[in-house]
Image (spheres, rainbow, N blue to C red):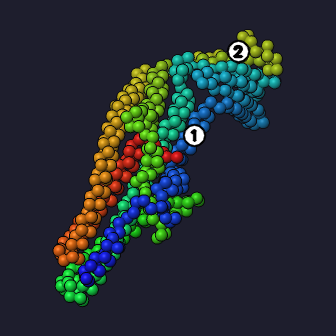
Amino acid sequence: MMRIKCFLIVLMVGIALPSYGQEPDPDVMTFKEFLAYVKQFHPLVKQANLVLDASEANLIKARGGFDPKIELDYSKKNFKDTDYYKLFNGSFKIPTWYGVNFKAAVDNNEGYYLNPENNTPDDGVYQVGVSVSLAKGLFMNERMATLKQAKLYREQAKADLQMMVNDILYQASKTYFIWLKNYRNYQTYQSFLENAQIRLEGIKKGYEEGEYPAVDTLEARINLDSRKLNLEKARIGFVKSTLELSNYLWLENNIPVELEDHIIPDEETLYLIDQVLSLTDLDLESFQIENHPKLISLDYKFQNQEVDKRLKANALLPDITFDYNFLSEVPDEINSFNGRNYKSGLSLKLPLFLRKERGAFELAKLKLQDLEYEILSTNLTLKNKIEALKNEIESYGIQNEVAQELVTNYETLVQAEERKFFLGESSLFVVNSRESKLIETVLKAISVENDYLNSKANLFNVISTVPE
C-alpha cells in the first residue's frame, strides 16, 4: 500500500519540463524587443552610422572643388621716401565640370619703378576670360574624379552600413540564443531536482515502513545531490550568459542596462524567429544574389577604381593650358570687351619618360583586375553559403522534430519504469538510469533547437538584411 501512495505522489507531480504553449510572462524579454533595443541604442550601431555621415561630409568636401573663388593680391614697396611700386590684383574664378575655368579680374598698379608690362590706367584694367586645359584635365581631372568618387563612396557606404548593422544584430542574436539555451538548461535541471527530492521523500517513507532497503535511500540521496550539482552549474551558465546579453542593451544617452534577475528569455522564439529576422517571405530559390549588399559595395568600389584608372590614364596626356582674356578700362560697358584688347597665353608641360604616370596607370589596371576576381569569388561564395545554410536549416528542422519525439518517448519510458518500481517490478537504479537518459535527451533537444536558431541567424547574416 505504501508503494502505491508513493507512486501516486510522483505521478501527480509528473516530469516537470519546460512548456512551449504558455502565454509569455510579463517579465519575458522577447527576441524582437531585444533586437529593437540593439538596433536603436547600441553604440556600435551608432558608430556604424558615422560611416554614412562621413561619406556625406566627403561629398560636401569634393563639391568644394567647384566652388567659385575670390582672390586678392596686393604688394607694395617703399624705400627712401620713394614709392617703388604698388601692385593690386583681384580676381573671381569659376571652375566648371570639365577643364574650363572662367575668370574676371582687375589690375591696378602704380609706382616709380613699376615694370612697364604692369602699367595700368589710373582706374585700372579689367579682364574677363577663360582658361582651358586642351589635353590633360579636359575630360577628366582631379576635382572631377574626387567628386565622382565621393558620390560612389556615399552609395558604397550605404551598403557597408547595412552589412555592419546586420553583423551587430547577428552577434546579438547569437548571444540571445545562448541566453535562451542556458535558461532552458537551468529550468530542466530545476525540474528534475524537484523530482529527485520527491522521490527521496517517498523512498525514505518506504524505508521507514520496511518497504525499501536502506541502500535505496542512499542511492536516492546520491541522485538528489547529483541533480543539485548539475543545477548549480546550469545556474552559473545562465548568469554568465545574462551578463553577456547585457553588453548589447543600452538606452538613450548611451546608458548601459543591466538585466534584473526576473527577466527571462522568450521560449517561443523558435516560432517567431523568421518574422523577427525578416525571413518569412524569403525565397532562396529566387534570391537575387546581385542585390546582396556585399556585391553592391564591391560594384561601387569597382566603379570608383574605374574613375581612378581614367584619372591615371589622363595623366599620360601632355599638360596644355590655353588662356585668353578680354581687357577693358570701362567694365560697365559690355561692348568694351572685344578682340582688339586682350591677353592670351599657352603653356605646355610633358615629362619625357612618363615613368611615374605609366606606373600609376598600370597599378590602377591591376587593382581593377583584382576587384574583378574578388567579385567573382564573392558571388560564388555567397551562393554556396546560402545553399549550404538552406540544407542545414532543413536538416536541423528534421533533427528538432526527432529530438522532441525522443523526449516524449523517454518521458513515457521513465513514467513506466517508475510505475514498475513502485509496484516492486523494477529497481531504483534502473529508474535513475532511465531518468538520466531522459535528462540527456532533453538537453540534446535544447541544443538542437539552439543549432536551428543559430542556422537561421547565419542565414540572416549571409544575406545581410536589416529587419524593420
Image position of 137 with respect to 434: above or below: above
For the residues carrying marks 1 and 2, which lies nearer the camera in this image?
1
Q: Amino acid at mark 1?
A: Glu
Q: Decide which of 303, 128 is in the foreground and name it.
A: 303
Q: What residue sits 82% from the left and 17% below the top?
A: 333
Q: Residue 387, image x and y in percent?
A: 32, 39
Placement of the N terminus among the 4 image quadrants: bottom left
Residue picked out by circle 2:
342
What residue do we see at 35% from left, 73% from top?
A: 13
User: Residue, x 55% and y 28% (percent of image)?
Assistant: 144
Instruction: Name the residue furthest top.
Output: 340
Tell which circle, 1 or 2, labels the residue nearer the N-terminal end: 1
Q: Which mark is residue 385?
A: none
Give the image location of residue 198, x and y in percent: 31, 78
User: Any mark on residue 56, and which?
Assistant: 1
Q: Nearer the viewer, residue 251 or 279?
A: 279
Q: Residues within 10 Å of mark 1 (few under 14, many from 20)?
A: some
Mark 1 secondary-structure assignment: helix
Left or right: where does residue 227 sit relative to residue 215?
right
Where does residue 264 sit, x and y in percent of width and height? 45, 65
Q: Specify whether residue 308 is in view.
A: no
Callout 2 crowding tier (Cα within 10 Å): few <14, some 14–19, many ≥20: some
Residue farthest to the front, as pictured:
1
User: Residue 212 appears at what percent x and percent y?
Assistant: 20, 84
Label 1, label 2: how far apart the Cα atoms are:
43 Å
Q: Is residue 78 visible?
A: yes
Look at the numbered disc 2 and give the secondary structure of its residue. strand
Q: How many marks?
A: 2
What is the three-letter code of the residue carrying label 2? Answer: Tyr
Query: Image check: 346 left or right of 462?
Result: right
Instruction: Judge by depth and name the residue closer to the eye, 106 or 278.
Output: 278
The front one of 79 and 139 is: 139
